[in-house]
Image: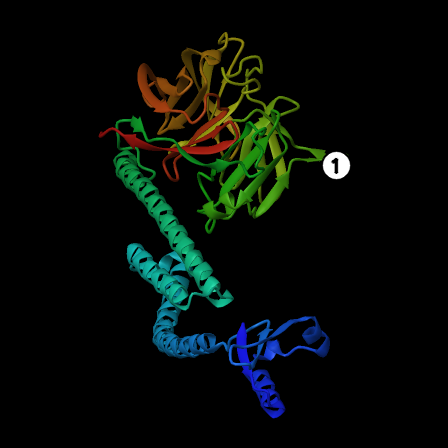
Amino acid sequence: MIVVSVQTHTDMMTSLLFSLLLLAPAHGWLSLEDWGSGSVQGTIGDFGQCVCNVFLPDTSFPADRVEHMQTSSTDLAVEIKLQINKVTSITGQLVVLLSELTNLTARLEILQSGPDKYIKLEFELLRIELRDFEALVTQLKTSLNISSPAIEELFIEIHNMSSIVDQLESYDRRNLEVIRIEFAKLQKKLEKCQDDREEISNSPIGSCTHGGILKFGKPVISQLNANLNAGFKYGGWGKDSIPLPGSEEMYWYAGSSDLLLSRISLYADYYKLIMRQALGTHELYAANRYDYRGSGNNYIVRSNALYYQYNNPFRMAKYNLTSSTVQTKVVPEATNRFSYHYSSNQNLDFAADESGLWVTYATEASNGKLVLGKIDEDSFEVQRVWHTSIFKQSVTNAFMICGVLYATRSVDTQTEEVFYTYDTNTSEESYVSIQFEKFQDLYVYLDYNPADQKLYMYNNGYYVYYNVKFRDA
């Protein structure tokens, strides 16, 4: 409330009211209607003067608020100056941070570019640097008391880089494990190589100045047959025992799902055999033209000719791989009633060694006992015969080395044994025990090749061979 003394003088009253209007705040200015609705009371004072009591909406000038505003403005100016100084300082730190982050990114890219770049892996150091970067960004965010997309993007990039470091370390660990495994395999291969060195023949190729077989090496499994068909359980493979000039590295393969020999494929070398890149394939059957097919699995290649059991009629056959012509001859007294233990139709078994070409079979006169015949390669005739005391059906297979017949039998699913020998040089036979490991239980082909002194086996569709070591003479 403002109490105003009014003189009797009219001009004094007018002056007083004008002063009151000037002192009132802006929002105190009212319309005429508001003034009319206000409260104005007049009385006569003790000394006869006129006293007016005027009630206004706001009776005081906001000097305290003006002073507070001035103080706040000064404080805000000081705070802004401090924040600007902080921003300037952190901007410098951010430039350094971005530079280091760029360097770190480049280092990670080098590590990601390939295992060959893992020269010096400092994963823990990378993590420490990333934690420092994250602390700097956190400090920047706290100091500015703001949250911007740029800062959030920095956080995301740092977290992503941390994940990359973890992945790289895990990847490197896996690489190290792989390397350890491969190193262990290499050690085994070296040990095996050392063992094989002990097992490799100690006799010159083509020489018979030794005391016979001492032992066989471990089975060397090349791979599944060229048809990549595990159902091709019947067949054979190997090398020409007397190769033509220029064909010393040539391999041959024949395989099928039945006992019929219908084709034979030739390969320029071992690599071509493994890669299944045939030099050529000879078909032994053409409908309405010819039928040179064979039966059984005990065939060999010698002097570029395939020697095998002819299917019909029952004879021995010689197929010339150069001219694609066939020649057949009857084996005197041979019968197709007696086969090897593992498979039927193994009636004529051809073999080659250092002393020539051979065929084993059985006759009715021998009551199924094994008979060994020496073949004259020029006339393709059996020129001499030896009779053994073992029944052919008790034998799983047989092969020749230096004129000595070696017969095998099964010991168990993993072991085969040479149990009988017959020396055609002395006509003496003996029972022995020279065991060797089988890749799989049953096999249908086993033949020795004098050109490399290896024993070749066709084992359930797989190429397998053995190194042979001989006794000293």
Badge 1 is on which residue? 289
Alpha-carbon neighbours of circle 1 within 10 Å: few (<14), some, or many (≥20)? few
Question: Image quadrant of residue 31?
Answer: bottom right
> Residue 354 appears at what percent x and percent y?
37, 34
Q: Nearer the viewer, residue 278 or 170?
A: 170
Position of 59 relative to 335 (above/below)? below
Position of 373 relative to 126 (above/below)? above
Image side of residue 437 versus residue 60, left or right: left
Question: Image quadrant of residue 468?
Answer: top left
Q: Nearer the viewer, residue 170 or 396?
A: 170
* SS class, disc 1: loop
Q: Nearer the viewer, residue 260 or 293?
A: 260
**Amino acid at the residue labelled 1:** Arg
Residue at 51% across, 81% down: 47
Position of 366 relative to 113 (above/below)? above
> Residue 217 appears at what percent x and percent y?
33, 31
Residue at 60% across, 85% down: 17
Question: Image quadrant of residue 405?
Answer: top left
* Numbered marks: total: 1
Residue at 50% across, 44% down: 273
The answer, for residue 269, to whether it is visible in the render is no
Q: Which image quarter holds the N terminus?
A: bottom right
Image side of residue 366 versus residue 41, left or right: left
> Residue 271 appears at what percent x and percent y?
47, 47
Give the farthest residue toward the bottom. Answer: 11
Image side of residue 269 versus residue 323, left or right: left
The answer, for residue 192, to whether it is visible in the render is yes
> Residue 319 appears at what percent x and percent y?
59, 36
